[in-house]
Structures are given as structure tokens and as C-alpha cells.
């Protein structure tokens, strides 16, 4: 009798401040463990050296838990996929070195993964064997995170082309930096999202960039937000406290308008109606709703990821590893991490 071979991939993610390990068996998720790092809260942002040290402490228990939850022992693994970049070099080194050591000791292949490709392919993680409703190719992916804002033309699992990207700050940075000047803890995006629900999105008008083509810019918005606060605080020192909700709603609306403007243009120019969204900012409830409305209006087939696959996670690294394994794309043990890496 013919049996489908078991392909079991262990994914390891350590690009920023989350240590994560996941097991995927023939494209189906078996476990996805994520250990966050509270140590950065004191500093209003991620401190690279502290992140590397925390990864070192977390990696063994996180991988151990991922294997246990998947119900497998290390010798059952087919290959190990790890995030090679982009990210913080010291953090990436921990995951890369661990993955190399384990691959050598188990004598199984090593697969290097571009973190950004992982975000895009998170949509192909299956929860169970018959979970077949996945984005068709080609599709457009709006990848919005703390470090990136890109529109990606996804030709196939491993063939992607960036057709638009930010020329300065990322959308997540716009959320976080504006939140910081309001005195919110890092990362401010989720709190802006929460407060925006009680505010008026049309209360304040912030400037929007005029950038050619499909590229984005968010640094002007940050300046416009800062100047607005500076002027308003001259007249009322409690301005932020009294107008938090309206500030958040108006900021969020401006970011969403900027993101959707170029996405709509990309969809028109390419004629593609298969649309996906990925990255930390895709957790934003206002963005999700605005996308759903656009999809209805424009006949888009829209895919919004599960919350647990929006921020950094190893499941997306393992699924990308699965497709690279099927394509026989492996890394050598001399592979070094890259702080910068493009799709
Ligand atoms: O993809 P991600 O986890 O990692 C990095 O790029 O490092 O994205 C993190 C970003 C942060 O800027 C955070 O503020 C933002 O995603 N974010 C949100 C929300 N949840 C996370 N931004 C707006 N609304 C949210 N609900």
C-alpha cells in the first residue's frame, strides 16, 4: 500500500524579541511555541544585546516544548528551518547557531529562511489535513510590520517580487513612534488600536505623503503628528490625556488610508483580486475592517491571517521550510545570518 512520506520540519525564529519554535508535519501545524521578552519594556524599545541574551536562555526550553507539544522526539525530524534574516544580528546568531548544532547532531538538512517570505507564506499553514482554502497564485500581499511595509507580488511559494515598499519608516514604526510621543509603552500599535475604537477618526487631519508609484512613506506623518501635539500642548497641557481616543483614531485612519491607497492601485495595475495581508500590523482591527470593506466593494478574494500568525512566530518559518524542502533548497553549515535580506 502507498503511504505518504512524513515530512516533519522544525522551525526556529529568533530575528527580534520573540524566541519561537514550531513543528509542521506535511504542511499541518503540530505546535507553535512563542516566548516573548519582557526585559525590553523598561526601555521603550528592543535592546539588541538584551534580546540576544534572552534568546540564549529561551531557545532550549522553547524547542523542547515545541517537540513535546507536537508529540515527537528529535530523531523523527526531517529537517530544521531557521530564520537567517532580516533582523537583529545577535538575535539571529542564536537561532542560526542552535539550528546548525541540532542539524549536525541529528544529521538532517538545514534550511535557511527569509523572515519576510515566512510572513507571506503564513497563509499556507494548515490547521488540519482538509484545510484547503488557501490563496491562489498569483496574489498580492500587503506585508506590514515594525520593520517593513511592502506590496509583494507572489508568483508562487518561493517566487516573490516586491512591487512597492516604504522609502523611510514602516507602518508599524509610525504607530509605535507616534504612540511613544503620547507617552504609551512600547510597542504602541496595539494600544493605539484599542483606544482608536472609542475615538473619532475624522477629528484631526494629518498630512499624507505624495510618493510616486507603489512606494510608501511614513516619516512625514510622524512629523505632522509631532507638530500637531506641539502646537496643541501650548494651549492645553492636558491635550493628549483629554484627546487620546481621537488622536489614536485619526492617526490609525491616516495610516490605513495610506496603506490601502497603494494596495488598491497595485490591484488595479496588476489586475489581481487575490489579496493577502501579513505582519504585525495586520493585527490592527481598523485595517482588517477597512480591508474587508474594500474586498466587498472591489470583488477581492481576501485572506486575513489568524492573530497568532501575524506577529513573529516559528510556524511561518517551518511552513516556508516545508516548501523549500519540497524544492530541495538547503543551506550549508557555513551559513551566516544577515541583518538585511530582501525578498
Ligand atoms: O511583525 P512584527 O511582530 O515584528 C517586527 O516587525 O518586528 O510587527 C510588530 C509591529 C509593531 O510595530 C507593533 O506596534 C505592530 O506590529 N502591531 C500593531 C498591532 N499589533 C502589533 N500595530 C497596530 N495595531 C495592532 N493591533
Image (cartoon, helix red, strand yellow):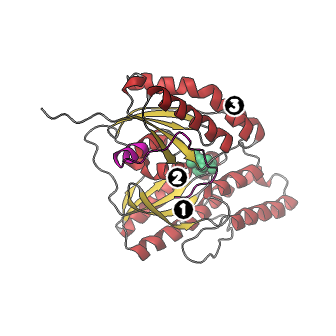
- Measured Cα–Cα span from mark 2 to mark 1: 10 Å
Q: Does the magenta stretch include residue 68?
A: no
Crowd rating for badge 1 (residues with CA inside 10 Å; few <14, some 14–19, many 20+)? many
Q: Do the residues labelled 2 and 1 touch (CB within 8 Å)?
A: yes
Residue ID at (77%, 64%): 228
- Measured Cα–Cα span from mark 3 to mark 2: 24 Å
* Residue 2 x, y percent position in the rendering: 15, 35
Task: Name the side, left or right, on which 134 lies relative to 121.
Answer: left
Residue highlighted by disc 2: 116
Residue ID at (42%, 43%): 321
Crowd rating for badge 3 (residues with CA inside 10 Å; few <14, some 14–19, many 20+)? few
Of 158 and 118, which appears nearest the observer? 158
Residue highlighted by disc 3: 53
**Can you say which quadrant of the picture contains the N terminus?**
top left
Task: Name the side, left or right, on which 130 lies relative to 324.
Answer: left
Which of the 4 image quarters holds residue 234? bottom right
Please indicate, yes or no, whether residue 224 appears anywhere in the rendered image: yes
Q: Is residue 324 magenta?
A: yes
Please indicate, yes or no, whether residue 195 appears anywhere in the rendered image: no
* Residue 138 x, y percent position in the rendering: 36, 64
Kind of element beneath mark 1: strand
Judge depth for marks 1 and 3 and give the one in front: 3
On screen, 97 above or below 219? above
Q: Give the range drawn in magenta.
A: 321-343
On screen, 164 above or below 118? below
Residue ID at (50%, 45%): 112
Amino acid at each position: 500500500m502507498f503511504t505518504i512520506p512524513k515530512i516533519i520540519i522544525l522551525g526556529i525564529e529568533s530575528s527580534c524579541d520573540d524566541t519561537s519554535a514550531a513543528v509542521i508535519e506535511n504542511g499541518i501545524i503540530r505546535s507553535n511555541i512563542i516566548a516573548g521578552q519582557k526585559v525590553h519594556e523598561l526601555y521603550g524599545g528592543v535592546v539588541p544585546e538584551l534580546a540576544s541574551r534572552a534568546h540564549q536562555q529561551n531557545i532550549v526550553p522553547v524547542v523542547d516544548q515545541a517537540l513535546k507539544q507536537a508529540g515527537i522526539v528529535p530523531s523523527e525530524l526531517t529537517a530544521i528551518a531557521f530564520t537567517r534574516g532580516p533582523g537583529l544580528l545577535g538575535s539571529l546568531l542564536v537561532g542560526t547557531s542552535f539550528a546548525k548544532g541540532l542539524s549536525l547532531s541529528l544529521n538532517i538538512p538545514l534550511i535557511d529562511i527569509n523572515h519576510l517570505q515566512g510572513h507571506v507564506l503564513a497563509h499556507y499553514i494548515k490547521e488540519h489535513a482538509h484545510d484547503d482554502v488557501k490563496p491562489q497564485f498569483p496574489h498580492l500581499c500587503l506585508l506590514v510590520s515594525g520593520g517593513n511595509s511592502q506590496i509583494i507580488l507572489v508568483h508562487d511559494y518561493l517566487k516573490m517580487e516586491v512591487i512597492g515598499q516604504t522609502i523611510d519608516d514602516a507602518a508599524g514604526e509610525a504607530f509605535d513612534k507616534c504612540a511613544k510621543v503620547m507617552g504609551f509603552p512600547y510597542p504602541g500599535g496595539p494600544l493605539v488600536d484599542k483606544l482608536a475604537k472609542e475615538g473619532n477618526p475624522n477629528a484631526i487631519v494629518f498630512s499624507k505623503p505624495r510618493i510616486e508609484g507603489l512606494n510608501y512613506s511614513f516619516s512625514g506623518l510622524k512629523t505632522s503628528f509631532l507638530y500637531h501635539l506641539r502646537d496643541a500642548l501650548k494651549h492645553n497641557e492636558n491635550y493628549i490625556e483629554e484627546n487620546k481616543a481621537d488622536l489614536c483614531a485619526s492617526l490609525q485612519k491616516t495610516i490605513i488610508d495610506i496603506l490601502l491607497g497603494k494596495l488598491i492601485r497595485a490591484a488595479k495595475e496588476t489586475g489581481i483580486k487575490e489579496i493577502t495581508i501579513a505582519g504585525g500590523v495586520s493585527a490592527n482591527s481598523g485595517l482588517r475592517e477597512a480591508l474587508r470593506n474594500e474586498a466587498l466593494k472591489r470583488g477581492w478574494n481576501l485572506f486575513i491571517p489568524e492573530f497568532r500568525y501575524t506577529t513573529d512566530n516559528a510556524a511561518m518559518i517551518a511552513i516556508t521550510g516545508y516548501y523549500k524542502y519540497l524544492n530541495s533548497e538547503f543551506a550549508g553549515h557555513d551559513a551566516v545570518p544577515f541583518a538585511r535580506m530582501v525578498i
